[in-house]
Image (tube, coloured by chain):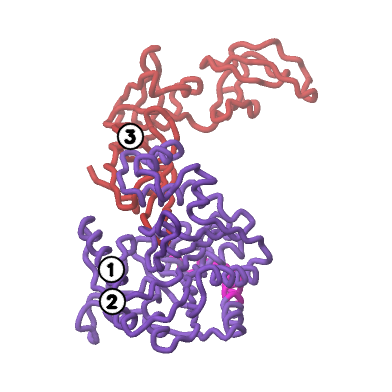
Chain colours: A red, B purple
Amino acid sequence: MANYSTSEFRSGMKVMLDGDPCSILENEFVKPGKGQAFNRVKLRNLKTGRQWERTFKSGETLESADVMDRVMEYLYTDSEFWYFMEPDTYEQYQADAAAVGDAHLWLKENERCDVTLYNDTPLSVAPPNFVELEIVETDPGLKGDTATGGTKPAKLVTGAVVKVPLFISTGEVIRVDTRTGEYQNRASKS
Amino acid sequence: MHWQPAASLAIIRQRAELLSRLRRFFSDRGVLEVETPLLCSNGITDPSIEPFTVPCGEALTQPRFLQTSPEYAMKRLLAAHGEPIFQIARAFRDGEAGSRHNPEFSLLEWYRPGFDHHQLMDEVGQLLNDCLGARAVETFSYRQLFLQRLQVDPFTASSAELERIARRHIDPGSMVGDRDMWLELLMSHLLEPQLGDGTLSFVYDYPASQAALARVVSAGDVSVGQRFELYVDGVELANGYCELTDATQQRQRFERDNAVRCERGQLERPIDGYLLAAMDHGLPSCSGVALGIDRLLMLMTGAPCIQDVLAFDWQRS
């Protein structure tokens, strides 16, 4: 594996740090006119999701991590594992609950999502920013009530619960922002 | 191809105005503008500064170095004529690139025979009030600053104690270093970002081990280097000295620098014999300071990155 020196650190680069794969978010060169130069590096631990800042002496090196971001198709889950397929090669990968994390709330079969592989095993899964999902359970819709701005909880086919306007009913398909878990609008029924 | 400039025309104009303003400031005070060579026979021994080397050329019998500051040549002028002088010069430092560093940058450097570092700090304050508008001036000795802000005495605390304080606030991993490295880490990470908030903050009288080219004097129980730094809005803007004038001590510092370079596996640098000969002849008692023009322009324009104030930054040059 290649080694990267602090001056080569770039946002998005994947490196090994204290035994874990990490992604570099920011790299700031700090040097007094006289004295030691440092690099303040903002990182995300790709296993735990923790973000923090580590300071290095300029010129220190880190080993690159065998981490790759792939677009894959979500297939199904057997509750223990979630299965994904690389669309070009049809190669399948199984991801455990730790790797899938909260993304399982937004995974829709046959939809594309971003899977991060570490040593060829899924490390994390990111759903698309917007998904369209069917409502399986919510209080009966109030016809014509589009003005009051009230909301009610609605359970989606994936198990996620989101707040929706009062006029939405069970069986409808809605568009959700997966980054915030917020209802966006009604989608045409699939 | 990014052939276009990095800086806007408005900022290019502000740079031109700043340069005239600086020249006017010094000509009003009878300080003479000088120029000295950029391509020098001797590099710099400072272990934390790397010059660019020009390895060969028709006119070169040996490699030369692009200057990292005009300090040595200006001191030779001082030794020869004893006049107050200033220079607006390009300086070059290898490996220094970031949002506040460009490997090629503009320095304003000036020398005042007969001034001590406090008199020169006053003059730096006047110049900056001229450029940035009126700001209150704060001064702290290096010792006061550490005592006030971190409750530690930077002159007497052990390396382990400084490391403990650093690790409470910063994650330096498995970093190892001496006392000065921990002090520099605390200064650059914890103190500097808070200095000069709407003010001009001068820090003066550094530990002797960080004196660089400043005179070292004893102050009570400790030795201090009569050096100062200016911080404005969390940015290090200028570094000055009440200059060391003793050639023998100067030679010892150069030799110590080279010893440190050897320890760290860096190349030894030739010692500037011209400077030592000039100091042997006699450097007048004086103070001098270098100020980053690009950073001053960042502060004047509110630009967040040094690239925004350079017509063509390193990536485009």
Residue occupying the point 48% across, 52% down: B143
Residue A21 - label: 3
Q: Is residue B213 above or below residue B189?
A: below
- Which stretch did the figure color magenta? B1-18
Chain of the residue displaying label 3: A
In-front residue for pair A155/B148: B148
> Which residue is label 2 attached to?
B272
Q: Quadrant of residue B274?
A: bottom left
Q: Mark 2 packing: few (<14 Cα in 10 Å), some, or many (20+)? A: some
Residue occupying the point 61% across, 78% down: B21
User: What amino acid is labelled 3 in the image?
Assistant: Pro
Q: Secondary structure at mark 2?
A: loop
> Seen from this angle, which residue lies furthest front?
B220
Residue occupying the point 35% across, 46% down: A56
Residue B254 - label: 1
Tell me the quadrant of the picture where the C terminus of chain A can be found: top right
User: What amino acid is labelled 2 in the image?
Assistant: Asp
Q: Mark 3 packing: few (<14 Cα in 10 Å), some, or many (20+)? A: many
Q: Quadrant of residue A143?
A: top right
Are dots 2 and 3 on a single chain?
no
Chain of the residue displaying label 2: B
